[in-house]
Image: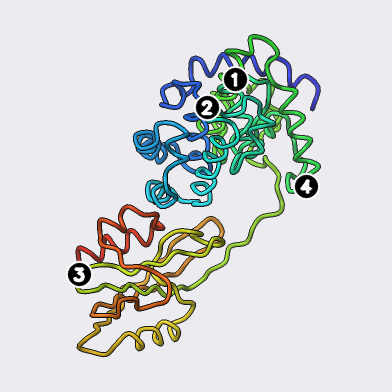
């Protein structure tokens, strides 16, 4: 850490958060670890504005960790549908079950113990421990990483695990030392707020930052060069053929995706890697006039590091009881209640209005 940078940082962050930070979000009005944990998982790689509705719906259905633990995975995935990054939902459910079965329904009170639970990494564990138990532990999510690397002028490549560990050490050193009961929650929230509203990736509002007088990047005049991370995941594209089967009752045939990969464990229409494979399946279902086939306009669904080019084919008719070995017929009220990937749910909703 460069000389003088760390002095009074915690005090300034705490004071700024009290007067300028975000203090009205629903999960900020509680120290209940269940509610804080739920918000932290939902906020991973997701905007606050998006999370607000889902947070309220989850609490209405699952008011405590026991209610979540005893729910079915389908119900959890159904409520999560549209929020994306579905591994979070599966880990959320597993974590709740583990808290109930191994901890008597009470979340552990230290970051070290929290980090062992499914889906809770070091930074999320630190946030829960700081907010709920005022433990003196750092966090290092994307926003905080950006704030601290700029503040410290930390230009080591964070693609290196050694450099990442060093930044964690700096984050620990900057933590408050006094009045931890109130200072730790406010300091932790303050760093998050600075990263989300002031120290943004492009065009940071340095003149409004309470740490400007200590910030190395601001003094250098190049805050956007931080953080430094050279290794980036490359984007790639895939083309999927989607087979939407609708029987005379309006039911849709859905299968469960494998427990790994894209949309793991979720309900979905049958997916084929190429048109030839889909055609073979359609031909095996029957012939006109028993079966009607129409191709719908293709569309692109953008994931974090992948573009899915989706080509839906809608097939209606009278099929055998089980047109495929794996899957089940679900009426509209049933498929709306299970975990469907957002683009599949949108496809079925849109087609319902135009085709049915």
Assess whether mark 1 and mark 2 are in contact (beta carbons under 8 angstroms): yes
Rendering quarter of residue 29: top left
Distance Cα–Cα, label 2 vs label 1: 9 Å
Q: Secondary structure at mark 1?
A: helix
Label 3: element kind: loop
Classify residue 26 by image quadrant: top left
User: Alpha-carbon distance for marks 2 and 4?
Assistant: 32 Å
| Left or right position of 247 against 185 | left
> Label 4 to label 3, Cα distance in Å?
57 Å
Sequence-wise, the earlier of marks 1 and 3 is 1
Q: Examine the image and state in which quarter residue 120 appears.
A: top right
According to the image, label 2 marks what residue?
Answer: 33
In the picture shown, does residue 289 fall above or below 108? below
Which of disc 1 and disc 4 is earlier in sequence?
A: 1
For disc 4, the marked residue is: 160
Residue topped by disc 1: 133
Q: Which residue is mark 3?
A: 249
């Amino acid at each position: 850490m460069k000389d003088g940078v760390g002095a009074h940082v915690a005090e300034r962050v705490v004071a700024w958060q009290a007067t300028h930070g975000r203090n009205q979000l629903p999960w900020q009005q509680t120290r209940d670890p269940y509610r804080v944990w739920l918000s932290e998982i939902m906020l991973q790689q997701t905007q606050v504005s998006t999370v607000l509705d889902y947070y309220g719906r989850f609490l209405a259905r699952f008011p405590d960790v026991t209610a979540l633990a005893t729910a079915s995975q389908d119900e959890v995935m159904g409520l999560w549908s549209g929020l994306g990054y579905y591994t979070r939902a599966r880990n959320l459910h597993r974590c709740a079950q583990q808290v109930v079965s191994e901890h008597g329904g009470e979340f552990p009170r230290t970051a070290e113990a929290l980090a062992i639970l499914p889906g809770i990494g070091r930074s999320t564990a630190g946030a829960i421990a700081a907010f709920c138990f005022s433990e003196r532990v750092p966090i290092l999510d994307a926003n905080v990483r950006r704030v601290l690397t700029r503040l410290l002028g930390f230009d080591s490549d964070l693609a290196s695990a050694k450099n990442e560990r060093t930044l964690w050490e700096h984050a620990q050193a900057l933590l408050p030392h006094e009045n931890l009961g109130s200072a730790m929650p406010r300091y932790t929230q303050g760093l998050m707020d600075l990263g989300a509203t002031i120290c943004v990736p492009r065009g940071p509002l340095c003149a409004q930052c309470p740490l400007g007088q200590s910030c190395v990047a601001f003094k250098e005049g190049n805050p956007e060069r931080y953080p430094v991370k050279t290794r980036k995941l490359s984007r790639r594209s895939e083309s999927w053929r989607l087979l939407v089967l609708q029987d005379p009752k309006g039911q849709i045939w859905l299968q469960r995706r494998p427990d790994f990969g894209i949309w793991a464990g979720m309900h979905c229409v049958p997916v084929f890697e190429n048109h030839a494979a889909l055609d073979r399946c359609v031909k095996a279902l029957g012939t006109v006039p028993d079966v009607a086939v129409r191709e719908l306009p293709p569309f692109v669904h953008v994931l974090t590091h992948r573009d899915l080019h989706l080509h839906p084919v809608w097939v209606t008719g009278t099929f055998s009881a089980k047109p495929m070995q794996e899957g089940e017929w679900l009426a509209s009220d049933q498929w709306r209640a299970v975990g469907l990937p957002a683009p599949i749910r949108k496809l079925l909703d849109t087609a319902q209005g135009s085709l049915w």
